[in-house]
């Protein structure tokens, strides 16, 4: 394809090129458009075998129409074909809202041969015309203002990172805007702790400059959409059908991760303890003292856990210090022996105590008269008092509202609800 783009061959005889069978990145389409649009009609088609191969087509009139798309639109449905974009309740979604694409019409098959369960899940009743069936594609799409359909990606290719659901195609779209990138792919990979990390696979014109790529992405994407690991390749592996071979990419050995340069073993006792903590939190064994906590999947939530683990071994560090140098070496140089912020004094009231004095309750600023008033109001007196300490701010607030309440309005913290249940077993 690159050979064709460079105008080394004469393709002026080509009158039409029909693309299909895979996701078409805007980046690739622009290269085709610039090379062939003057003499050739370029069509992007979409369809599935279950709906007689092609169901829609799209022809770009200009490149400006693709500005807000991560992939080239799949156009409008063909004659005798209907497209429905529905939510999880099989309801129509508004224009511009993402949903799952369903196909209806004469081209939709009846079922899979000898696969009843799969047939039930894929060929569903048309909620708008019970006589017809729809094929559930599993593809995510949205309606564009011009009536075309924007293909977003596979429903099962969406991943959830730190509570955010993201589409990998959006990341790839931004990566293609980086000048040195020829081809790319972003895939999720789960570590041993169950955390999902993004891996970026790149084919570049020049040598890989990780910080430059990450800096470029950080101006366009939130941090949770920036890949944790990076692997530089000579070319992206493809299946026999010409699609990206994701299985091969995910099987590439971890030693190819550019986040780890030269392994340096821990030397001090603190570094050894930190290495164990890193391994537990990040779910990987390949960690040296130069390992960057964030480049191996660390994030703000894990920083909190890191600090908590350090407290267990009587060490403390600020969040700011971790971000300044998130390596084992850097953290070990900044940690200090931790002491409890508040030491609870020993309880002065014992079982054999017959008389409570102010020195026995150091958390209170009561004099002897105040203590005597409290003891006099407690049933059983001193023998029924184990300790005395001030209320927390939240408790003070609750007690204040209780004192301010009256019989008519009631206590605002007491909320009565009356529920009735049918005692029938049905």
Image (spheres, grey):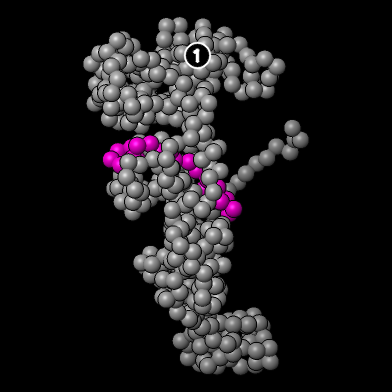
The residue carrying mark 1 is 53
Q: Is residue 372 left or right of residue 8?
A: right
Question: Looking at the image, how many numbered discs can be counted on the residues?
Answer: 1
Residue 132 falls in which quadrant of the image?
Answer: top right
> Is residue 255 at all visible to an observer of this figure?
yes
* As drawn, 182 above or below 252: above
* Image quadrant occupied by the N terminus: top left
Magenta segment, which residues? 175-196
Q: Position of residue 22 (x, y in %)?
A: 45, 24
Task: Give me the residue at 67% from left, 23% from top.
Answer: 117
Callout 1: SS: loop
Q: Which residue is drawn at 38% across and 67% down?
A: 325
In the visual, does 15 lie left or right of 313?
left
Q: Which residue is depicted at the point 45% across and 13% down?
A: 55
Q: Is residue 341 above or below residue 160?
A: below
Q: Quadrant location of the C terminus?
A: top right
Whether 379 is drawn above or below 65: the answer is below
User: Depth check: 91 or 358 in front?
Assistant: 91
In the displayed orientation, state which residue is furthest to the right: 425
Residue 102: give x, y in percent of width and height. Answer: 49, 20
From the viewer's perspective, is residue 388 above or below residue 185? below
Q: Was residue 418 drawn as part of the magenta stretch in this picture?
A: no
Q: Which residue is drawn at 64% across and 16% down?
A: 112
- Front-most of 120 and 325? 325
Q: Can residue 129 be seen in this view?
A: no
The magenta stretch spans residue 187: yes
| Most foreground residue, 97 or 51 | 51
Q: Callout 1 environment at 10 Å: few (<14), some (14 to 19), or many (20+)?
A: some
Residue 81: % across, % down = 46, 10
């Amino acid at each position: 394809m690159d050979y064709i783009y460079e105008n080394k061959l004469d393709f002026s005889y080509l009158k039409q090129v029909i693309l299909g069978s895979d996701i078409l990145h805007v980046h690739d389409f622009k290269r085709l458009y610039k090379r062939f649009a003057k003499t050739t009609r370029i069509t992007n088609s979409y369809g599935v075998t279950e709906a007689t191969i092609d169901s829609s087509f799209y022809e770009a009139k200009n490149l400006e129409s693709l500005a807000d798309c991560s992939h080239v639109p799949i156009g409008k449905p063909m004659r005798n074909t209907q497209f429905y974009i529905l939510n999880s309740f099989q309801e129509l979604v508004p224009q511009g809202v993402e949903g799952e694409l369903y196909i209806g019409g004469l081209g939709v098959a009846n079922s899979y041969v000898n696969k009843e369960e799969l047939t039930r899940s894929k060929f569903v009743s048309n909620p708008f015309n019970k006589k017809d069936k729809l094929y559930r594609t599993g593809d995510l799409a949205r309606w564009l203002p011009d009536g075309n359909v924007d293909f977003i990606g596979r429903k099962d290719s969406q991943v959830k990172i730190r509570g955010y659901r993201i589409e990998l195609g959006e990341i790839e779209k931004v990566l293609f805007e980086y000048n040195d990138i020829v081809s790319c792919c972003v895939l999720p990979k789960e570590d041993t702790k169950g955390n999902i990390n993004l891996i970026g696979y790149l084919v570049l014109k020049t040598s890989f400059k990780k910080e430059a790529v990450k800096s470029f992405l950080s101006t366009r994407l939130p941090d949770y959409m920036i890949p944790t690991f990076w692997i530089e390749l000579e070319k992206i592996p493809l299946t026999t059908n010409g699609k990206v071979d994701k299985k091969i990419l995910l099987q590439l050995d971890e030693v190819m991760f550019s986040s780890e340069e030269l392994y340096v073993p821990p030397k001090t006792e603190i570094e050894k303890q930190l290495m164990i903590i890193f391994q537990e939190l990040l779910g990987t064994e390949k960690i040296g003292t130069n390992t960057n906590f964030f480049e191996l999947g660390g994030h703000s939530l894990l920083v909190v856990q890191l600090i908590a683990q350090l407290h267990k071994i009587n060490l403390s560090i600020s969040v700011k210090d971790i971000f300044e140098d998130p390596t084992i070496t850097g953290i070990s140089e900044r940690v200090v022996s931790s002491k409890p912020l508040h030491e609870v004094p020993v309880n002065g009231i014992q079982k054999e105590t017959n008389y409570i004095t102010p020195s026995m309750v150091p958390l209170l600023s009561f004099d002897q008269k105040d203590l005597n008033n409290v003891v006099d109001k407690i049933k059983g007196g001193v023998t029924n008092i184990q300790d005395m300490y001030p209320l927390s701010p939240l408790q003070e607030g609750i007690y204040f509202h209780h004192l301010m309440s009256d019989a008519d309005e009631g206590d605002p913290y007491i909320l009565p609800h009356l529920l009735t249940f049918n005692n029938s077993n049905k």
